[in-house]
Image (spheres, helix red, strand yellow):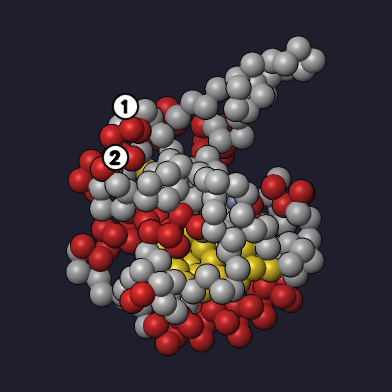
Amino acid sequence: MSAPSTSCRIDVFWHDGMLDHDTGKGVFDTGMNPGFLEVLEKHPENSDRIRNIVSILRKGPISSYISWHSGSPATIHQLLSFHSQEYVDMLIEADKNGGHHAQPTQADGYCFFNNAGLAVQLALDSGCKKVLVLDIDVHYGNGTAEGFYRSDKVLTVSLHMNHGSWGPSHPQNGTVDELGEGEGFGYNLNVPLPNGSGDKGYGYAMRELVIPAVEKFEPDMMVLVIGQDSSAFLKLNVVYPEVACYPPANRNCLKRVNI
Ligand SMILES: [Zn+2]
């Protein structure tokens, strides 16, 4: 593979502390064997999964595009840029992981702190005027959307399976009519995709909806939330086998938004 140009470079920030996250074994929420299991599996959100992601990035097909940097734990001040004081106080002693479902005041979908939301807020605090969040996880990036729902400085775009709400911790539905509120009205774009959308449907949604919105917004920076669960190769998509398999449709579309 030839040396990548700087416009194709991906910066990865890594800290070994990411491997300390231990969610235990058992029936996922109880950690107990109900009496009829042969083995207690690890919780799906575990450090082996992180190890493999790092290994793929180091040795896999995109390794030559990656520039590695050392990451550092978020400061309390940084956490408070997205989450409420009360919520942070509650979690402060715990070693918790991050993800796009975590909302400013509550955990959701294995996510406690919202790493995408923190990156966006840090960018705004550092002088960026407009930030785009493009979320291609198979689930709605509800936490990030909620955090910037009333802001016109952040365009949150999420392409996801049409799964709706999954309970009190996840009240957002991810439907097209969740458009933002107040100054943020029109700055949340939800693209719920029906099962069976596949590459064609995914490419169509990207071309007809996402790219025009991004080009109109003209962001200074983009935070890409890559949930590998929307890939045809990944485990979660066995449950939803026909929802968008993003390569190669995404590759071409993402090139057009300059990442
Ligand atoms: Zn997901």
Q: Secondary structure at mark 1?
A: loop
Q: Residue at x 69, y 47 (%)?
A: 236
Q: Which quadrant would the N terminus be assigned to in this image? A: bottom right
**Label 2 belongs to which residue?**
86
35 on left or right of 130: right
Closest to the camera, between mark 2 and mark 1, is 2
107 on left or right of 131: right
Is 59 above or below relative to 121?
Answer: above
The residue nearer to you, when weighing 2 against 163, is: 163
**Neighbour class for label 2 at 10 Å: few (<14), some, many (≥20)?**
few
Q: Amino acid at mark 1?
A: Glu
The residue nearer to you, when weighing 177 against 2, is: 177
- C-alpha distance separating marks 2 and 1: 13 Å
Q: Is residue 197 visible?
A: yes
The residue nearer to you, when weighing 156 against 231, is: 156
Q: Residue at x 45, y 48 (%)?
A: 102
Residue 73 place in picture, x, y as percent: 29, 39
39 on left or right of 190: right
Q: Residue at x 42, y 27 (%)?
A: 20
Q: Amino acid at mark 2?
A: Glu
Residue 171 place in picture, x, y as percent: 54, 54
Q: Is residue 132 visible?
A: no
Is 209 above or below relative to 139?
Answer: below
Residue 200 place in picture, x, y as percent: 74, 76
Residue 138 place in picture, x, y as percent: 63, 57
Q: Is mark 2 within 8 Å of ligand 1?
A: no
Q: Which quadrant would the C terminus be assigned to in this image? A: bottom left
Q: Which mark is residue 93?
A: 1
Q: Secondary structure at mark 2?
A: helix
Is 247 above or below relative to 71?
Answer: below
Image quadrant where residue 11 sits:
bottom left
